Amino acid sequence: MDNVKVAVRVRPFNNREKERKAQCIISMQGKSTTIKNPDTQEEKTFAFDYSYWSHSPSDPHFATQETVFNDLGVLVLENAWKGYNTSLFAYGQTGSGKSYSMVGYGEDRGIIPCACEEMFRRIEESDDKAVRYKVEASMLEIYNERVRDLFNPVKNQKADVGLKLREHPSTGPYIEGLKSLPVQSFEQFQEIMDSGTSARTVAATQMNATSSRAHTIFTVIFTQTTTNRESMKAMDKVSRINLVDLAGSERAVSTGASGDRLKEGAAINKSLSALGNCISALADASSGKGKGFIPYRDSTLTWLLKESLGGNARTIMIAALSPADINFEETLSTLRYADRAKRIVNTAVVNEDPNEKLVRELRNEVELLRKQIVEAGGGTIPRPPTKEEEEASVVSKSKTEQLLNEAAEAARKEAEERAARELAAYQERLAESQRLIENLTKTWEEREKEGKELELQRRKMMEDMGLAVSEDDLQLPQLVNLNEDPQKDGAVIYPLREGESNVGRPDNKAVKIQIKLIGLNIAPFHAVITNVPGGQASTLRLRVVGSSKTWVNGVLLEKDAEVTINHNDRILFGNNHLFRLHYPVGRNRGRRARRASCWST
């Protein structure tokens, strides 16, 4: 039995806090973190497993990304190598530095990329010939209580519906249809992370969401297959590594949110409140105070993290803090949240040979369900008398007999409906178990083939949307998206090929649209960008179609206006689609620009 390990990390002041001349209210000493009330000057101290001071780089005890990874990332890998399920999730208010710790920005990488790089380094350096390693990865997003598979573009065509969250007695909660891609190297891992981020960015833009108001869960399934040289039997040791980047908690008053953004924030805060309720209930249960009921099903997030929070997993939580006095209430709430979490006790076990037993149990269940379907569909239900039988009987029936017949008819219909519902439920459970068996018994080669097919589908979808899909596309002049979220900034690239590239809505049937956009004030045929080759550099011209709302460097273009656009020009189509024009110089400059911050000139 292990307690949830909790780390807190305080970031530097951001520009908003500097402009308001905020004062630092956080101090750290060893594993203790102290917060001071700016009004009463009262101090409150909390003790955690790790306290990271990342406020001022000049301080001698400044905690770098490397420091955090060496403590937490290495701990995650050690648990995985031993065969334990492990979870790492970051919590805090919006802008507190959660994504920076988990993913990082640019070259300053966070725990997720560093942990995966270290995992593949260990695999490559392993000299044990009796052990084979397999790595699979999946990435999902929970937005407004709907689940999206960030690796599967086909499943996301119905973004307003989302994937179904189910729970099976043998496997626990899972997402139906979620794809896990085989990963052979750290380079491939980076590529699928980029594709997942691109999918997330495109979806956010199509939904007019300009912020990262969604929970992201990146799962790595790490399998070690050891062959006994004497018996020649293979034994699997499987670890699920859940790396969770929670959306930020925030007060509507402090963000000025309204409309859809307010509803979006309410959905996020609801799921985070449900997470807080689960943490409180688990903490009470661990100390013997609670009643034992944990409200996992109050939100999609808590239901999906059921095993991570109070089940078979070793869990680590990072609480990201703002040091500013203007965020005192949110920071104190985060510290109390983390203080409750550290009291949770999980029971993690080494996952050796789970599949063989699980497949056997599922096959037994399938056989039982088949019998139940036969029994549910094969029984006979009393039917009403035929017309001949009625004529042969007494012609005159009393009112009592009529009522009895009506009751019998109603009972018959109810029995039929109940049998039909039971039959449908059995068939659904049968199909669910068969899908699980099919997924568990897939060979590694089948999974690799499925991953390649998924990549082809993704590339096809990106081509249809006009996005860059090859290195050649990245050598062309391009529109690179700008986003306030550094993870999404520069994640979407539209190459500008020779000739005309039409900008507009994807549902335009009259004109072929190369750059497809959806959003407020996006016209069916919005604008035309013409790439005129010549000499060492191309000349790009932007023409507005009609009165479509288009800005270049903050200037609204007039009706049917045509202008020359240059490197680093900022172009806004409609209300939300903001791009920077980028001219690549030399080989692979496009990919580097994609990962760098596009807000810089």
Image: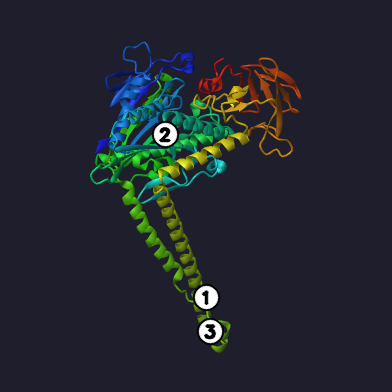
Label 1: which residue? 406
Label 3: which residue? 398
Kind of residue sitting beneath label 1: Glu
Q: Nearer the viewer, mark 1 or mark 3?
A: 1
> Residue 288's spot in the image, x, y percent?
24, 42
Q: Nearer the viewer, mark 2 or mark 1?
A: 2
Quadrant of residue 207 within the rendered picture: top right
Side of 585 where 340 appears, left or right: left
Label 2: which residue? 184
Q: Nearer the viewer, mark 2 or mark 3?
A: 2
Kind of residue sitting beneath label 2: Gln
CA separation in Å, label 2 and label 1: 68 Å
> Residue 56's spot in the image, x, y percent?
38, 14
Q: Which badge, 2 or 3, comes first in the chain's sequence?
A: 2
Kind of residue sitting beneath label 3: Ser
CA separation in Å, label 2 and label 3: 80 Å
Q: Secondary structure at mark 3?
A: loop
Q: Which badge, 1 or 3, comes first in the chain's sequence?
A: 3
Observer able to see residue 441 = yes
Q: Which mark is residue 518?
A: none
Sort mark 1 into few (<14), some (14-19) or many (20+) by Cα contacts within 10 Å: few
